Image: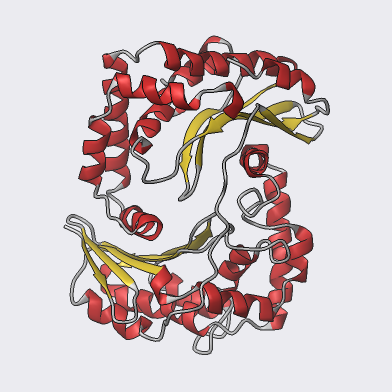
């Protein structure tokens, strides 16, 4: 059973013991991400994440940090999202103190040398190029830009080449001092836990103090008609993301919408995968996802389709959305979806790093803990009538949003077909 504790400096600690594993993961999650930035420092959250791996006083180079972790066979990485940033190390449980030592050293003692900053700019610019050259990844950025416009919520997590190129050491240090306060951090230890976790974390993270935190600008939903966002690119395939505005995390209908997304495009037996790929042969990849932020959310279906048949694909997706508004999901299909969600979750949570992510994310975004069993109970309570009610609420003409990557310039023809 998990335990949670707020340490003397305000840091949140969650421990999640697991049986049957010899590994343990430390995950440090910070409640700041790409939404917590300005136009001039766009990309700074992601840039700072990179710089924590570039050397400390004790471990002066990237190789020194990576070498210590590699010699014990650790898995380690970091990630930046819209609303949080995470750093994790997964190790043989007998090496947990080394993992805690290294992660704390990176977050508290990084040098941020100017030569490393200048070198990393080139790395990040190539990462931007990589994302823009991969439509399956970039389509999500285009969709959110269409939803939220020229605001931190609508900007890419990774930033822009121009802003990244201008970031300096002072910018990174000021952002660190503002955003990485102990009261904005949750640390999760998950796996084969032995010894006094609170004492261990306190010893290495006690220096982390509170900061003058700068909060994000909250999103105001005010869409009044369907919207189309086109990223012109000469491609042999059109990549689309067609969805609607949704609900924030913690909303009473969050789990209903999660089930709805799986029914639509969350598996190879889902409705849209079956219709677009298996019956029509219009796509190789098809997926529907529900995204929940603290102040907003959305549901969208993404697919890569023939340029000449993009309108047909859009109409098929809209038709499946409309069915959910008008026809109850059969009990057999609903049960199958619930079993799928439970089965996938159980398999995933056998790993200590996934278990750490489960607890840390929920704590950092809502100061509330939801155990896997609590989650399954909420999923099991979802009824067909709930799905129909939520579908009617979100699948409205005025809430429709379409993002396209492909050889198109005129969005008027797409606006005409965006209706139920």
Q: For this view, does 6 lie left or right of residue 182?
A: left
Hey, which residue is sitting farthest bottom in the picture? 57
- At x 38% / y 22%, what residue is drawn? 389
Asked if one can make out residue 158 in the rendered structure from this viewpoint, the answer is: yes
Which of the pair 364/251 is nearer the observer? 251
Q: Position of residue 381 (x, y in %)?
A: 23, 30
- At x 61% / y 14%, what residue is drawn? 315
Residue 121 sits above or below residue 231 on the image: below
Image quadrant in which the C terminus is located: top right
Which of the pair 233/249 is nearer the observer? 249
Asked which quadrant contains residue 104, the reply is bottom left
- At x 68% / y 15%, what residue is drawn? 417
Which of the pair 304/333 is nearer the observer? 333
| Coloring applied to the structure | secondary structure
Q: For this view, does 123 lie left or right of residue 291?
A: right
Asked if one can make out residue 307 in the rendered structure from this viewpoint, the answer is: no
Image quadrant in which the N terminus is located: bottom left
Asked which quadrant contains residue 224, the reply is top right
Residue 196 sits above or below residue 381 on the image: below
Residue 419 sits above or below residue 304 on the image: above
Residue 252 sits above or below residue 288 on the image: below
Q: Position of residue 267 (x, y in %)?
A: 42, 27
Q: Position of residue 146 (x, y in %)?
A: 67, 39
Q: Position of residue 317 (x, y in %)?
A: 56, 18
């Amino acid at each position: 059973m998990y335990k949670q504790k707020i340490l003397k400096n305000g840091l949140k600690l969650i421990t999640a013991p697991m049986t049957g594993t010899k590994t343990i993961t430390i995950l440090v999650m910070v409640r700041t991400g790409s939404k917590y930035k300005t136009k001039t420092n766009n990309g700074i959250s992601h840039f700072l994440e990179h710089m924590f791996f570039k050397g400390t006083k004790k471990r002066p180079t990237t190789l020194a940090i990576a070498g210590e972790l590699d010699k014990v066979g650790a898995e380690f990485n970091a990630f930046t999202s819209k609303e949080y940033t995470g750093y994790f190390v997964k190790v043989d449980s007998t090496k947990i103190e080394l993992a805690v030592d290294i992660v704390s050293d990176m977050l508290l003692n990084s040098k941020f040398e100017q030569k490393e900053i200048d070198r990393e700019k080139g790395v990040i610019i190539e990462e931007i190029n990589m994302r823009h050259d991969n439509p399956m990844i970039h389509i999500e950025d285009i969709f959110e830009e269409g939803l939220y416009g020229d605001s931190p919520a609508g900007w890419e997590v990774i930033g822009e080449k121009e802003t990244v190129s201008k970031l300096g050491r002072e910018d990174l240090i000021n952002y660190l001092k503002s955003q990485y306060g102990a009261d904005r951090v949750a640390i999760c230890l998950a796996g084969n836990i032995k010894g006094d976790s609170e004492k261990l974390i306190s010893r290495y993270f006690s220096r982390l103090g509170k900061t003058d935190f700068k909060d994000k600008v909250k999103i105001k939903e005010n869409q009044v008609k369907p919207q189309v966002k086109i990223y012109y690119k000469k491609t042999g395939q059109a990549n689309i993301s067609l969805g609607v505005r949704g609900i924030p995390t913690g909303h009473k209908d969050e789990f209903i919408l999660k089930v709805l997304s799986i029914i639509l495009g969350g598996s190879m037996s889902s409705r849209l995968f079956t219709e677009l790929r298996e019956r029509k042969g219009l796509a190789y990849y098809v997926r529907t996802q529900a995204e929940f932020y603290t102040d907003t959310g959305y549901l969208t279906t993404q697919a890569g389709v023939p340029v000449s048949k993009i309108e047909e694909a859009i109409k098929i997706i809209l038709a499946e959305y409309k069915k959910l508004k008008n026809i109850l999901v059969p009990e057999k299909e609903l049960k199958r979806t619930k079993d799928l969600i439970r089965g996938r979750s159980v398999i995933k949570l056998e790993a200590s790093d996934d278990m750490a992510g489960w607890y840390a994310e929920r704590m950092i975004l809502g100061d509330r803990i939801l155990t896997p069993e609590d989650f399954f109970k909420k999923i099991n309570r979802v009824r067909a009538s709930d799905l129909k009610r939520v579908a009617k609420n979100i699948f409205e003409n005025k809430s429709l949003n379409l993002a396209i990557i492909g050889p198109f310039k005129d969005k008027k023809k797409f606006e005409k077909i965006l209706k139920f």
